RNA sequence: CGGGGCGUAGCGCAGCCUGGUAGCGCACCUGCCUUGGGCGCAGGGGGUCGGGCGUUCAAAUCGCCCCGCCCCGACCA
């Protein structure tokens, strides 16, 4: 595994990101398949941590996991008008199978609302069958024009929740409940602060009545949608004729929701915390929380140090880097760029004195401590790091958030922003949820990211484009 | 799909203009030496030069055709 230098963020943020992803052993471009990536050992292990946290919360809120086919009859996509319009440009379609042209082509799922609709019709007859709460862990294909590892790839992994309810109120409650789960995972596990909000009509999911999202800000000030929760109303219920009989004996279409989080989260945490030395992983998702690097010169030192290192590692649940022929310096660089939160140095002097050196990845702080207190220091360091990563990201977002009171002002701030050069901002402005307003913002390649659920600013105002009254400021930014 | 760039060792590249033994750095293997932030020295292995056709005594190099990848624009979690 060649270890090359990492491009500094200052020089080229996009190149830096690629370097961190590859040097951190997170992923590499598949090359042989357009827009796809290979998720490597370190990256997949991070995903497994995210999965465990999310899955636990999904089950704790009453959902069950199922698995649906990856192929969907093409006609299914066409049953919901907006849905087909939104997704058809990015579909991969299977037309030949078993050496024969298929009578009806299959679409490789871009999302499963349609196939869920079909099965919900079979599974739901009565209000007693509701709410129906399911979730699926799966892969998805969307033929995107431009891809970036983790942030947007042709194939990605995700979880998609699908639920059916007897009333709109109940469905909306579900939508917001899962939005809270998403915000919780982002902030408390990934240490990525997010804004919960409503997407504009122009930005909502194709086929939804309303889309809610958690929106994050990366180090370069560019926005990244980290999760979405959709209120599907009765749109898919009608399209797939999913009716239930109420306790009063009346027939009605079910009220549905769907919500998803993807491997993009890995991109989010990389872009939020990593630095010019490489990956920085929040302790809660780090596959290896600590590595012990033994240092020795002579053979008898080697034996002593390795023994002490093994003991320490066992006690801490850490990994010992016993590779021969690698200098300690090379090992420090190796683990640093893989984002290991804590590295312990253990040399002959330490063994003799019963000490060790504890080094923290994010701050680079080194401290000589007694081996007996290693366990306690280790735990405290992980906790501090997790908390401070979130606090720093919050602080950065605060510094890069500004208010604007005219469209010219918004444009002036956001026009020069690019993913490569950075300088991105969250611009908060009063702007009405109206597709023509989205269009105007798009003219300088920005977008209305969310209308926050919680107003932390000055309340109602007049739309900067139409003058009509709006309840609060929305977040406008450039996004990935 | 429009515009630009690139395909030579696992990776990053030089050589091409002006045709004549396929090179450099990193990585890899062996040995010695080193080890508290990318050690050093010596030796070694590894190539259908993206593919095809042509020109020529001779093609990585010149010509034609094809293929693939990357970047920039229009779509998106």
Image (spheres, rainbow, N blue to C red):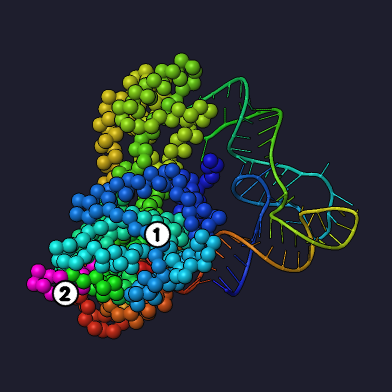
Rendered image quadrant of residue A138: bottom left
Rendered image quadrant of residue A232: bottom left
* Image point (49%, 21%), residue name: A297
From the image, state whether disc 2 or disc 1 is nearer to you. 2
Where residue B47 appears, as percent x and y from the top left, is: 70, 44
Q: Earlier in the sequence, mark 2 or mark 1?
A: 1
* Image point (27%, 42%), residue name: A384
* Image point (14%, 63%), residue name: A128
Where residue A155 appears, as percent x and y from the top left, is: 44, 58
Q: Is residue A170 left or right of residue A141?
A: left
Question: Are the residues flagged by discs 2 and 1 in contact, CB closer than 8 Å?
Answer: no
Q: Does the magenta portion include A208?
A: no
- Whether residue A146 is visible here, answered yes or no, is no
Q: Which residues are magenta?
A: A245-258
The answer for which chain carries disc 2 is A
Q: Which mark is residue A70?
A: 1
* Image point (31%, 30%), residue name: A316
Which class describes the residues within 10 Å of circle 1: few (<14), some (14-19), or many (20+)? some
Which class describes the residues within 10 Å of circle 2: few (<14), some (14-19), or many (20+)? some
Query: From this viewpoint, which residue is outermost toward the left?
Result: A248
Q: Secondary structure at mark 1?
A: loop
Q: Secondary structure at mark 2?
A: strand
Q: Does the magenta portion include A254?
A: yes
Where residue B59 appears, as percent x and y from the top left, is: 80, 53
Find the distance from the CA under tag 2 to the CA under tag 1.
32 Å
Residue that mark 2 sits on: A251
């Amino acid at each position: 595994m060649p270890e090359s230098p990492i491009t500094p963020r200052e020089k080229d943020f996009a190149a830096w990101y690629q370097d961190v992803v590859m040097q951190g052993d997170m992923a590499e471009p598949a090359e042989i398949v357009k827009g796809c990536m290979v998720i490597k050992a370190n990256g997949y292990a991070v995903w497994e941590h995210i999965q465990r946290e999310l899955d636990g919360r999904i089950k704790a809120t009453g959902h069950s996991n199922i698995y649906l086919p990856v192929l969907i009859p093409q006609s299914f996509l066409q049953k919901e008008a907006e849905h087909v319009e939104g997704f058809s440009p990015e579909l991969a379609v299977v037309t030949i199978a078993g050496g024969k042209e298929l009578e009806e082509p299959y679409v490789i799922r871009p999302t499963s609302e349609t196939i869920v609709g079909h099965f919900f019709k079979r599974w739901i007859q009565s209000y007693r069958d509701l709410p129906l709460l399911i979730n699926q862990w799966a892969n998805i294909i969307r033929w995107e024009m431009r891809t970036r590892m983790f942030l947007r790839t042709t194939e990605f992994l995700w979880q998609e929740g699908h639920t059916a309810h007897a009333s709109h109120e109940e469905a909306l409650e579900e939508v917001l409940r899962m939005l809270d789960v998403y915000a919780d995972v982002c902030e408390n596990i990934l240490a990525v602060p997010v804004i919960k909000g409503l997407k504009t009509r122009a930005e909502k999911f194709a086929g939804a009545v309303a889309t809610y999202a958690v929106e994050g800000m990366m180090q370069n000030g560019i926005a990244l949608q980290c999760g979405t929760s959709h209120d599907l109303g009765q749109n898919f219920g009608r399209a797939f004729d999913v009716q239930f009989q109420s306790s009063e004996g009346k027939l009605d279409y079910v009220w549905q929701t769907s919500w998803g989080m993807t491997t993009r989260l890995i991109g989010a945490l990389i872009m939020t915390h990593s630095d010019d030395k490489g990956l920085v992983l929040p302790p809660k998702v780090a596959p290896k929380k600590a590595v012990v690097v033994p240092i020795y010169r002579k053979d008898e030192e080697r034996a002593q140090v390795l023994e002490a290192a093994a003991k320490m590692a066992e006690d801490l649940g850490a990994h010992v880097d016993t590779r021969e022929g690698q200098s300690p310096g090379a090992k420090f660089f190796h683990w640093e760029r893989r984002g290991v939160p804590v590295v312990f140095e253990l040399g002959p002097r330490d063994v003799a004195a019963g000490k060790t050196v504890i080094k923290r990845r994010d701050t680079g702080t080194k401290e000589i401590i007694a081996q007996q207190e290693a366990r306690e220091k280790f735990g405290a360091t992980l906790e501090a790091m997790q908390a401070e990563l979130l606090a720093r990201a919050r602080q950065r977002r605060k510094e890069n958030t500004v208010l604007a009171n005219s469209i010219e002002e918004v444009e002036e701030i956001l026009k020069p922003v690019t993913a490569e050069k950075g300088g991105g901002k969250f611009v908060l402005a009063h702007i009405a949820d109206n597709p023509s307003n989205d269009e105007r913002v798009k003219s300088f390649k920005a977008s209305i990211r969310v209308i926050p659920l919680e107003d932390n600013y000055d309340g109602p105002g007049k739309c900067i484009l139409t003058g009509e009254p709006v309840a609060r400021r929305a977040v406008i930014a450039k996004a990935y």
